[in-house]
Every structure is written in structure tokens, then in C-alpha cells.
Image (tube, rainbow, N blue to C red):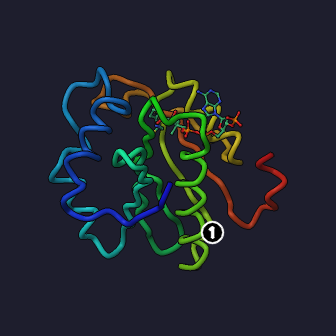
Amino acid sequence: MDMVLAKPADARRIAVMSRQFVERGLPGWSWNVARVTGRIRDPESVVVTARVAAGIAGAAIMHFAESSAHLSLLVVVPEHRRCGIGRRLVEWLEASARVAGTFVVSLEVRAANLAARSFYRKLGYRELVCLPRYYNGIETAVRMSRDLRCCLQDAT
Ligand SMILES: CC(C)(COP(=O)(O)OP(=O)(O)OC[C@H]1O[C@@H](n2cnc3c(N)ncnc32)[C@H](O)[C@@H]1OP(=O)(O)O)[C@@H](O)C(=O)NCCC(=O)NCCS
């Protein structure tokens, strides 16, 4: 498995993965092809893919602001889950954030997505607040955050 920066030609695949596995059941398509393409071209964002022989098995998008970074999207296709790809994608982006001098990473996850909440907690993220009607005015999000200066033992 290789970690490779996304190219504009990858945008459709990433957007479809988001629609299928992250945004499933929500009205509208937030991470559509145009938006993913914009992030791939955005100098303040990083879009990374996990590639296997068959193609893209996972992808993640991080946006860097002055004092914090935001994990905007993370998805691994079902047949490659529980193999460490999600962890590697997040750790790869966290390493980029450290290099950029950014030590706080935040994200939002659908409150009903208990698997992803467990995943992020395992990686050292803390649940901060519930955000009612965050998604399309109908679905609650949980905001989570990790201070990368915390010792790594917190995440085990
Ligand atoms: C959440 C997601 C990215 C995890 O990716 P993954 O590659 O399967 O995760 P990893 O294999 O790196 O898991 C690392 C650890 O997180 C925890 N974890 C992962 N998936 C979990 C699940 N479904 N339930 C509980 N804990 C889980 C485990 O502790 C796991 O370690 P282990 O397998 O040794 O027990 C993936 O399930 C996914 O794409 N889901 C659909 C989209 C989504 O929910 N995205 C995130 C919200 S934006």
C-alpha cells in the first residue's frame, strides 16, 4: 500500500467514495467532484490517497489554517477496512501538520457514525461538542479534536 498525493484525475473516485461511504443518506453531495478538485489544487489543503494494486483504497483531505488543521474527509473502501489504512492516512496528515507547525487537528463526524467515533478515539481524538443540524440542517455532528503535542501513549 502506497500513500500518494491525489491528482485532479483522482477527484471523481474520491468524491464517489465520499458519497457512498461518508455522506450516504444525506440530501445533496457535499464532497462532489468540483469541491474535491478544488482541494487538490488548493495550496492550503492536502489530499492524500492510499493506493493498492486495484486502485484507490482510501483517501483523506486536510485543510491547514494558521493555528489548526481540519480533517475534512476520511474514507476507506469496505474491502480494505480494519487493515490500518485509515490510521495510516490520519497519521500521514498529522505528520504533515507537525511539519507545518500546526498542532491541533479538528474534525466533525456524524453522531450516528459510532464506528468512526471509535476509530478517532482510538487515534487519540477527544469528543468536544455535539452540533445539532450540522449536516444539511438535519443531522447532528460531533466535533472532535486532537492536540498533537500530547504524548502518543494517549492514543493506545
Ligand atoms: C472510519 C474508517 C475511516 C476507519 O478506517 P480503517 O482503515 O478501517 O481503520 P483502521 O484499520 O486504521 O483502524 C484503526 C483502529 O480504529 C478502530 N476502529 C476502526 N474501525 C472500527 C470500527 N468499525 N469499530 C470500532 N473501532 C474501529 C480499531 O481500534 C482499529 O484498530 P484494530 O483494527 O487493530 O482494532 C472506515 O471505517 C471508513 O471509511 N468508514 C466509512 C467512512 C467514515 O465513516 N469516515 C469517517 C467519518 S468522516
Q: Residue furthest right?
A: 153
**In terms of image quarters, where does ligand 1 lie?**
top right
Crowding at mark 1 (Cα within 10 Å: few <14, some 14-19, many 20+): some
Question: Is 139 placed above or below 53 here?
Answer: above
Question: Is 104 placed above or below 19 here?
Answer: below
Compared across the picture, whether 38 is left or right of 2 comes to left
Q: Residue furthest front?
A: 53
Where does the image place residue 74, in percent across and percent down from the top left?
44, 45
Where does the image place residue 118, in percent across and percent down from the top left?
65, 32
Question: Is 135 placed above or below 4 here?
Answer: above
Instruction: Identify which residue, 61 or 137, lies in the foreground.
Output: 61
Compared across the picture, whether 155 is left or right of 142 comes to right
Where does the image place residue 95, in percent across and percent down from the top left?
60, 69
Question: Is 13 placed above or below 148 here?
Answer: above
Q: Which residue is mark 1?
A: 103
Compared across the picture, whether 34 is left or right of 106 comes to left
Looking at the rendered structure, the secondary structure element under dot 1 is loop
Question: Mark 1 vs ligand 1: CB under 8 Å?
Answer: no
Residue that appears at 20% across and 62% down: 8
| Residue 32 position by quadrant | top left
Residue that appears at 24% across and 38% down: 16
Compared across the picture, whether 40 is left or right of 96 comes to left
Where does the image place residue 147, in percent across and percent down from the top left?
68, 60
Residue that appears at 55% across and 46% down: 85
Instruction: Identify which residue, 9 or 68, lies in the foreground.
Output: 9
Q: How many numbered marks appear? A: 1
Instruction: Identify which residue, 81 or 150, lies in the foreground.
Output: 81
**Callout 1, which amino acid?**
Phe
